[in-house]
Amino acid sequence: MGWLPRIFTRTPEPQRPTAVRMLEGASGKRWSNTPAFGTTGAEVLAGAPQVRARARHLRFNDPTACNAAEILKSALVGYGVTAASKAEDDSEREDLDARFSDWAERTGFAALLGEVADALVTDGESLLVMRTTDQGGLRLQHVPAEQLDESYTVELSNGGYIAAGIEYDSDDQPVAYHFRPSRPTDTYTGFRAPVRVEAADVLHVFKRQGAGQTRGLSWFAPVILPLNELSQLQDALQVNAKVQAMLCGFLVDQNATGPNPFDSDDPLDVSLEPGVMRVLPQGYDVKFSSPQQMQSGVDLVAVSLRQIASGLQIPEFLLSGDMRGVNYSSARTALVQFRQHVEAAQWTLLVPALNRIWARWQLLESLRGEISGEPNGCEWHFPKPQWVDPESDAKATKEMLAMGLISRRMAAAQLGWDIAKIDEEIAADRAREQSLNLDFQQQQQQQQSKSQ
């Protein structure tokens, strides 16, 4: 066979199979409408202002979002945080604790911590500026997140740079914050040159969710769209309920020969009144409207609430207030996980900022001559969460004290009390009992023996 016939009778070579990605998360299957997420720092800087604005709207207008913010704020700081000095001398430790407690009461420190926790949850970040008063004491100023200008980004000549209002040195360490001046009564934001504040005087509290993140992101970010959809669903269900409550009747002329029943001159009035019986015109029939009920509406709302609760890491029964189907075991299991999440936020976000507040307060007090001695650290005791069974909780605290796992000072601080004041009041009570010849312990023992 010649070469020409072989060309036309040649069989094609088998094609190589195309490469197919086996990781579905990296392929296009079922992800065609999901865009890729960029670097955390860039994505947060681009979207945080709009997310913050929407979260604030939901926080002050949507009841579910409002309840979630209040739950997280109360869990983070409660009625306040108790400071316990680490000074070795007992008298010095008691004096420092008492002075800091007085300062906290004068300055409204507990209420300020509530603002910080609320801003941390809603805005995603909280900014505190530590200032010195004319008398030399410490004053904390809570600055809204939008005053730290996100649009202020510039390269500096010394190798540093300013990103979203935060100035960094050549080693990527924050050295200053640039705030836009504003007054609480300003309705509209005008242009004013930013004010540079040293980083040593600023407390920037936010949760870092990735490398390179310089600004905080609202904790409502994963649930903003579900919250909005749930609000629209509830509005639709309410409108549907209103329509179902309306009783509408339609007269059908079966023969098309009857008079017009809606004519004002027609003596036959077929309008309905309570307890009335009507005779319809000849040839007419009545049909009442029966709007379709959304049988799955309640279940859909419950599923949406569970989705929102999981996104905020809050037990669903706390968010919805629906305790049906919740028992002691399931509630305790959910609360344990929730409190682990809260404790992680307390010790990784709030405690470092509180330590800086304590150090600055102690420094200014020593410069004023109010306190003496070497600087020392501080322990912070958050309000102890109460279980649904206070008796069991008290027994557990008693056993921990007996086993030496905690001290009376720690137990009292968890309850928000100063152990020195408690001991003074106990001593005063016992002295008064002796002066009046009272013995409550003996009476209690006698009652217990009688009951046995």
Image (spheres, rainbow, N blue to C red):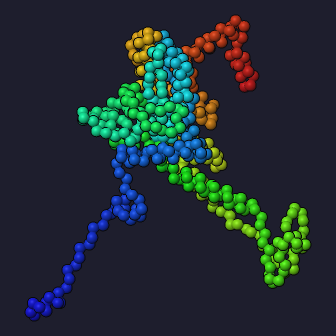
Which of the pair 295/163 is nearer the observer? 163
Find the residue positioned furthest to the front. Answer: 191
* Above or below 54: residue 447: above
* Above or below 413: residue 341: below
* Above or below 68: residue 23: below
| Image quadrant in which the C terminus is located | top right
Q: Position of residue 95 (x, y in %)?
A: 50, 12
Q: Residue at x 59, y 53 (%)?
A: 231
Q: Position of residue 198 (x, y in %)?
A: 36, 27
| Image quadrant in which the N terminus is located | bottom left
Residue 327: quadrant of the picture = top right
Q: Residue at x 68, y 60 (%)?
A: 240
Find the residue positioned furthest to the left. Answer: 2
Q: Is residue 362 visible?
A: yes
Q: Is residue 207 visible?
A: no
Which of the pair 41/381 is nearer the observer? 41
Find the residue positioned furthest to the top. Answer: 435
Q: Residue at x 47, y 14 (%)?
A: 135
Residue 270: quadrant of the picture = bottom right
Q: Residue at x 68, y 66 (%)?
A: 292
- 93 sits left or right of 320 in the view: left
- 287 sits left or right of 433 in the view: right
Which of the pair 50/366 is nearer the observer? 50
